[in-house]
Image (cartoon, rainbow, N blue to C red):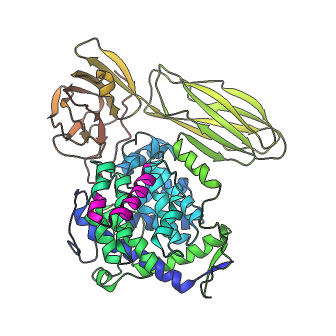
Amino acid sequence: MAVLNRSEVWRRVYACWMGKNAGGTLGAPLEGQPGPHDFDWYPRLQEGGIPNDDLEMQLVWLDAIKRAGWRIDATVLAQAWLTHIGYNWNEYGIAKRNLRWGLLPPLSGAYDNDFWNDCMGSPIRSELWACLAPASPRLAVRFAFEDALVDHAGGEGVWGEMFNAALESIAFVVRDVDEALDLALAFIPSDCQIAQAISDTRRWWAELRDWRKVRERIAEKYWHREPTHAPQNLAFTVLGLLASEGDFGRAITTAVNCGQDTDCTGATAGSVMGILLGEVPEKWAAPLGETIATNLSWGGIRNITPLPDVRVLTDEVLAAAERLLAWHGAPVRIADAPTDLTDLPDDWLKPDEGIYELWERNRYPWRVDFSLKAVQVGVDYRGLPTINPETPKMVTLWLHNCQPVPLTVTLLWDAPSDWRVEPMRSSVTVPAKGIVGINAHIHAPLRLPQTQTLWCQVRVHERPAELAVPVTLIGERRWMVRRNGSEWQTEWLPDSELPLERWLGGKAGIIEARLWVWSPKTQRVVIGFPCNGAFQLCLNGVEVLNAHQPDYLVRPGQQGPASHYAQVTLRQSWNEVQVRVERGDQAIAAYLLFTDPTDLHRHLTDLALTQAP
């Protein structure tokens, strides 16, 4: 078995966190600015450090998996999201709303999240998984995959976290940046945008050897107006590593000077360099200290006592890494003996066949798997987990017999009295080690709730009773729509986006749309209508928003400028939202969002947008 020296691993883990802190502190004041910049030192230093979700969420994950007996999967982390994470920025808020509605991962990360699941919320959380699995990228990547599913399933964000975790794990034993990049790229599909952006960046660097010229190439091909879009930012991080030539400061300043999501690019470049070098230069480390700054004071994280400093964090992670490497049967252990990689299998730093399963699960995030005792059950939603009263929803339950003998399985549905499932009961014999799929058609009532969980009992003949499997469906939004003054028509929309281009056929015109919103109480809320067309939005007959900003970046954020977001009062009972949008020569898009008016801006789950009076 290969050996990693305990003191050496400790130094590299410590340098990983210190490097992340340094790069994040360098980039934080510039976050969201397009660049290029020309900084060679921290733009701002704050006593006690600058709190950053990039790091503190990993403190939460470490605590969560410790309490779960070191089980690392998306369901454990989903509970930690709801218990400990207060902020609701972008994909975080959407995933948390989906979880509160009852959707399990990967649905929580895929549903109504097409814009944000390609972004940086998960790639920034990779360091923990690498440090828990040093020199073991297969494990680090699987841990990172489970993490990213919760809020980025189906998107580039999953590939970004997998790549970062692989690179950081490999960096514990591979010192050459190009060799480490080659190995890490094998853990993500070559046709994903992130892999292509990284490969192009490496080719351009070999060609030009000038970070500004390479940045121009990256911007020409991968630039996105959303600063957190992952492909451009992963490319900037890799450019920092390539341009560093082993110099920590050059790595983080190059990554940050490229612009966009600078706290993330700087932090990841810093963490990778920290692992590679085994130290962070005193120049960059000394001004920051070892204290871990968090957002605990205002509720950004909650219900947790954060670890006080980087040394304690490193001790905790190292102890956990020793346990996890042994538990998962890794051919490497951490010991007091000198590092000796002689017995490390030649392919241990490369993906095994299991990587293809992870790729497929991210490419198709509409299935939730349950491991029962006798069988495994996969609930396949066949697409979006939504329903309306006019169109039955078909789901498929895949039964995988794990036993070496045939099993007779009966499915019995438990649904509210006004719901109908066809068939309510079905039986099938599943061959030994075989897989059988059973379709069910679900019919929703006219009085459609915003969310509904049905239960399917899985009864295995002459075997102990099994738990029921949940199937959660989100009610679609019932809009009344009129195009260019035509007749009003009912449109059931599956999520928060209004398909304005489809409604207008990609041509100039006017859309009028009405939606009834049921509120269980009188409450102040924020209503958001991010849109780049000329629009007016009224609530209960009173205009609350009116804007025309053709260059507005349309994204489903939890908050935004006063031109597109307003505090309003929803009365108890029915409230009517009316919008009028005019399209000119350019394509337009829009979302309708409701959040609470506090600093946390939580997406509301107590409203119903599925019915009319």
Q: Answer left or right for 400 relative to 379.
A: right
The image quadrant that residue 44 belongs to is bottom left
Q: Is residue 580 above or below residue 51?
A: above
Magenta highlight range: 193-215
Q: Is residue 589 above or below residue 561?
A: above
Q: Nearer the viewer, residue 348 or 128?
A: 348
Q: Is residue 104 above or below residue 329?
A: above
Q: Answer left or right for 505 relative to 391.
A: left
State the residue at coordinates (29%, 62%). 262
Q: Is residue 301 visible?
A: no
Q: Nearer the viewer, residue 121 or 305?
A: 121
Confirm whether the magenta stretch covers residue 393. no
Q: Nearer the viewer, residue 159 or 581?
A: 159
In x, y percent, where is residue 505? Answer: 31, 21
The image quadrant that residue 18 belongs to is bottom left
Q: Answer left or right for 301 relative to 412.
A: left
State the residue at coordinates (31%, 76%). 249
- Taking the view exactly as shown, the residue that stands out farthest to the front is 207
Confirm whether the magenta stretch covers residue 195. yes
Circle count: 0
Q: Is residue 15 visible?
A: yes
Magenta segment's dominant SS is helix
In x, y percent, where is residue 467? Answer: 67, 44
Q: Is residue 486 above or below residue 155?
A: above
Locate the N terminus by quadrant. bottom right
In x, y percent, where is residue 460? Answer: 77, 39
In x, y percent, where is residue 451? Answer: 46, 35
State the residue at coordinates (68%, 33%). 437
